[in-house]
Image (tube, rainbow, N blue to C red):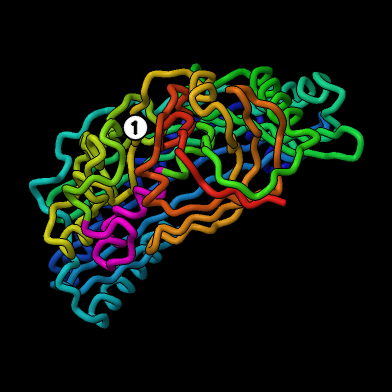
């Protein structure tokens, strides 16, 4: 720990109380005026402040303390349909002026793009809600250190098979986001995020396995205790010991809730505006068509209080709103910002910042009931590699998990690959259980797919 850290060791600062916040708001207004003074027809400015601390321990000892404090400004100038963007982390007036000049010069040099421009004025979030996203962890860094060491010590002492640790990380961060454009919009809000993670190594005979668990929340009161994190990390790690091999076969597959979001992330990518207008999606031109079972719905809820994926407005100042991307299996909306919306002759969905709290409905059955429904097959708990082709829908991923027989987990398996095509996988989703992982932006329970190919030994 350096001398510079020691003077900050007593208490983590409150970002709202940071004198730089009003300075950044004033700088945002100044930048808007300066861009227009240079002859730009339109402008937008994003300014932000991030502050955080992360504690890492390993083998019951403090490994390091990392402090982060970042600030920056991004300016965009429009000269008609010509657009130029530049950014800087140095917020003194000269640097900002240089950044504005750079953005204006870029805009004057690039080709015209008839689809570029600000989002429509009528969609601006002039009356955006307070989503209660800011809950700073006003405790000492020493407490974070104690929490990290407590978590790791408990994990290492809980089971003799846990022989090593890749460390425990405890972090807390705060940010302040400011956005303005020449539609008359200026919006800003703070947010916070707290996290504890534990990565363990277990061994039995000659077999070694690694796994982890984490908890994350905007509000400390919703964060799991360090002991609970340790218990779950130990359980996940030792369950993987002495894996068996599988022969190549076709089988039902359950994507555990921990990773099921990745399957529906493929859907979001496929119906994104950029992949739609480029015609590079296996779900190209599917508005109004059924692509999922009729009982399945994908609904965005961006205004959940304290939600990890909540945003009152997107990166273009557009008011976020509840919407269905897929309702009763039918595509209702693509995922659009203003640029991709214009390319498709549609209206932005307020997703310039990505998706916000995407809920996938379930059939109100428990995870054990889902195992029983599958009866025999593969439970996948970890995916490896990047073998997904969004254009064709071809899917091939390395996998780790457990073999299930008679609705019960029998033994762990590894060194396998699961393969199929997303068209078939999605249309053949049989059921989803009610164990959604609320640590993610896509909230979905464990998902049972009728059949995939397992490449084994």
Task: Report the residue that reaches farthest toward the right.
Answer: 205
| Picture quadrant of residue 341 | bottom left
Q: Position of residue 81 (x, y in %)?
A: 16, 72
Front in this rendered view, residue 387 or 235: 387
The answer to which quarter of the image holds residue 119 is bottom left
Q: Is residue 377 left or right of residue 298?
A: right
Q: Residue at x 47, y 18 (%)?
A: 366
- In the image shown, does 162 or 144 lie closer to the viewer? 162
- Residue 255 lies, in percent from the top left, at 52, 37
The magenta region covers: 264-285
Residue 142 visible:
no
Within-10-Å neighbours for mark 1: few <14, some 14–19, many 20+: many
Q: Quadrant of the N terminus?
A: top right
Q: In the rendered image of this protein, does residue 283 appear above or below residue 3?
A: below
Report whether 220 appears left or right of 243. left
Give the percent coordinates (x, y) of residue 276.
26, 61
Q: How many marks?
A: 1
Residue beneath the point at 22% across and 34% down: 322
Residue 6 is left or right of residue 300, and the answer is right
Q: Above or below — where is 401 with respect to 98?
A: above
Q: For the point 73% across and 42% down, which residue is it?
A: 3
- 405 and 131: which one is in front? 405
* Residue toward you, 222 or 142: 222
| Magenta-span inclusion, residue 271 | yes
Q: Mark 1 — residue?
A: 359
Image coordinates of residue 379 in percent, x first then y, are 58, 34
Is residue 39 found inside the magenta-colored segment of the image?
A: no
Query: Residue lying furthest left in this view?
Result: 122
Q: Secondary structure at mark 1?
A: strand
Residue 158 visible here: yes
């Amino acid at each position: 720990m350096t001398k510079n850290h020691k003077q900050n060791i007593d208490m983590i600062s409150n970002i709202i109380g940071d004198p730089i916040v009003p300075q950044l708001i004033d700088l945002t207004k100044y930048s808007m005026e300066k861009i227009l003074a240079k002859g730009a027809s339109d402008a937008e400015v994003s300014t932000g402040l991030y502050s955080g601390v992360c504690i890492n321990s390993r083998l019951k000892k403090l490994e390091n303390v990392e402090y982060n404090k970042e600030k920056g400004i991004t300016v965009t100038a429009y000269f008609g349909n010509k657009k130029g963007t530049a950014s800087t982390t140095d917020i003194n007036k000269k640097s900002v002026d240089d950044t504005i000049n750079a953005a204006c010069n870029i805009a004057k040099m690039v080709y015209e793009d008839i689809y570029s421009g600000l989002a429509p004025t009528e969609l601006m979030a002039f009356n955006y809600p307070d989503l209660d996203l800011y809950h700073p962890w006003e405790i000492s860094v020493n407490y974070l250190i104690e929490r990290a060491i407590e978590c790791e010590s408990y994990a290492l002492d809980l089971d003799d098979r846990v022989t090593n640790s890749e460390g425990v990380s405890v972090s807390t961060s705060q940010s302040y986001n400011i956005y303005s454009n020449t539609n008359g919009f200026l919006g800003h809000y703070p947010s916070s995020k707290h996290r504890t993670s534990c990565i363990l190594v277990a061994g039995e005979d000659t077999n070694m396995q690694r796994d982890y668990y984490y908890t994350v929340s905007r509000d400390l009161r919703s964060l799991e205790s360090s002991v609970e994190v340790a218990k779950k990390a130990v359980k996940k790690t030792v369950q993987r010991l002495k894996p068996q091999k599988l022969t190549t076969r076709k089988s039902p597959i359950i994507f555990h809730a921990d990773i099921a979001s990745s399957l529906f992330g493929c859907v979001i990518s496929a119906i994104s505006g950029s992949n739609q207008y480029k015609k590079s999606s296996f779900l190209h031109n599917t508005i109004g068509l059924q692509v999922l079972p009729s009982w399945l719905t994908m609904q965005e809820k961006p205004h959940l209080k304290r939600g990890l994926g909540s945003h009152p407005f997107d990166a273009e100042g557009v008011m976020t709103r509840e919407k269905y991307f897929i309702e009763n299996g039918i595509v209702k909306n693509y995922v659009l910002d203003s640029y991709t919306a214009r390319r498709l002759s549609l209206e932005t969905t307020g997703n310039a910042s990505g998706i916000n709290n995407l809920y996938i409905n379930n059939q109100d059955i428990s995870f054990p009931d889902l195992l029983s429904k599958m009866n025999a097959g593969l439970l996948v708990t970890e995916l490896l590699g990047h073998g997904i082709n969004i254009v064709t829908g071809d899917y091939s991923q390395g996998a780790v998990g457990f073999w299930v027989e008679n609705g019960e987990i029998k033994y762990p398996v590894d060194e396998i690959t699961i393969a199929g095509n997303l068209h078939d996988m999605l249309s053949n989703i049989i059921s989803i259980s009610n164990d959604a992982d609320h640590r993610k932006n896509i909230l979905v329970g464990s998902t049972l797919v009728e059949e995939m190919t397992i490449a084994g030994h």
